[in-house]
């Protein structure tokens, strides 16, 4: 992942801010929830460490900003349920690893919020 972002002129890694994550999932099992948060946090720390070594900036988005990034097609924007490891878009037929699809969506969203331009129209 760090190697991938290095190919861009101004590399940056974006991750979801964990503060308040899963706040709305009160029905899920508390222990399970905590386990997932902890292991994900561990992964973030590792990515941050690697990114710092390479001089890559790390940014965080809030849960609101990353909403639906795991369910939306990064090609056409269609939102669909993801089953299994592969995101298969029923609208345009795009098949993609679900994590990569999520990453591309987050990248799109971040770039538009920073004014870098993307397929999403800017307002204001
Ligand atoms: Zn699509």
Image (spheres, grey):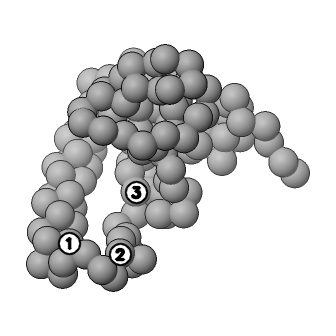
Q: Residue 71: horizontal and vertical position, in percent?
A: 45, 43
Q: Residue 79: horizontal and vertical position, in percent?
A: 54, 41
Q: Residue 97: horizontal and vertical position, in percent?
A: 31, 27
Q: Earlier in the sequence, mark 1 or mark 2?
A: 2
Instruction: Tell me how far mark 1 sits from mark 2, CA to CA.
Output: 9 Å
Residue drawn at x 20%, y 41% as measured from the top left: 50
Q: Earlier in the sequence, mark 3 or mark 2?
A: 3
Q: Are marks 1 and 2 in contact (CB under 8 Å)?
A: yes
Please indicate whether residue 108 sits to the left or right of residue 118 in the image. left
- The residue carrying mark 1 is 33
Residue drawn at x 13%, y 60% as measured from the top left: 39
Q: Callout 3: 10 Å neighbours few (<14), some, many (20+)? A: some
- The residue carrying mark 2 is 25
Foreground: disc 3 or disc 1 = 1
**Can residue 100 be seen?**
no
- Residue 16 is marked as 3
Q: Are marks 3 and 2 in contact (CB under 8 Å)?
A: no
Residue drawn at x 66%, y 47% as measured from the top left: 113
Instruction: Tell me how far mark 3 sits from mark 2, CA to CA.
Output: 16 Å
Which residue is nearer to you in this view: 52 or 94? 94
Residue drawn at x 80%, y 42% as measured from the top left: 122
Which residue is nearer to you in this view: 62 or 50? 62
Please indicate whether residue 62 sits to the left or right of residue 109 in the image. left
Q: Quadrant of the N terminus?
A: top left
**Can residue 97 be seen?**
yes
Foreground: disc 3 or disc 2 = 2
Which residue is nearer to you in this view: 86 or 119? 86
């Amino acid at each position: 992942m760090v190697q991938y972002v290095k190919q861009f002129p101004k590399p940056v890694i974006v991750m979801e801010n964990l503060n308040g994550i899963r706040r709305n999932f009160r029905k899920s099992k508390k222990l399970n929830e905590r386990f997932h948060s902890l292991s994900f946090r561990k992964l973030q720390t590792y990515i941050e460490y690697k990114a710092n070594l390479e001089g890559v900036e790390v940014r965080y988005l809030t849960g609101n900003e990353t909403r639906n990034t795991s369910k939306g097609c990064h090609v056409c924007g269609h939102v669909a349920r993801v089953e299994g490891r592969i995101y298969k878009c029923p609208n345009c037929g795009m098949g993609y690893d679900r994590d990569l699809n999520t990453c591309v969506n987050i990248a799109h969203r971040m770039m538009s919020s920073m004014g870098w331009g993307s397929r999403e129209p800017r307002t204001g």
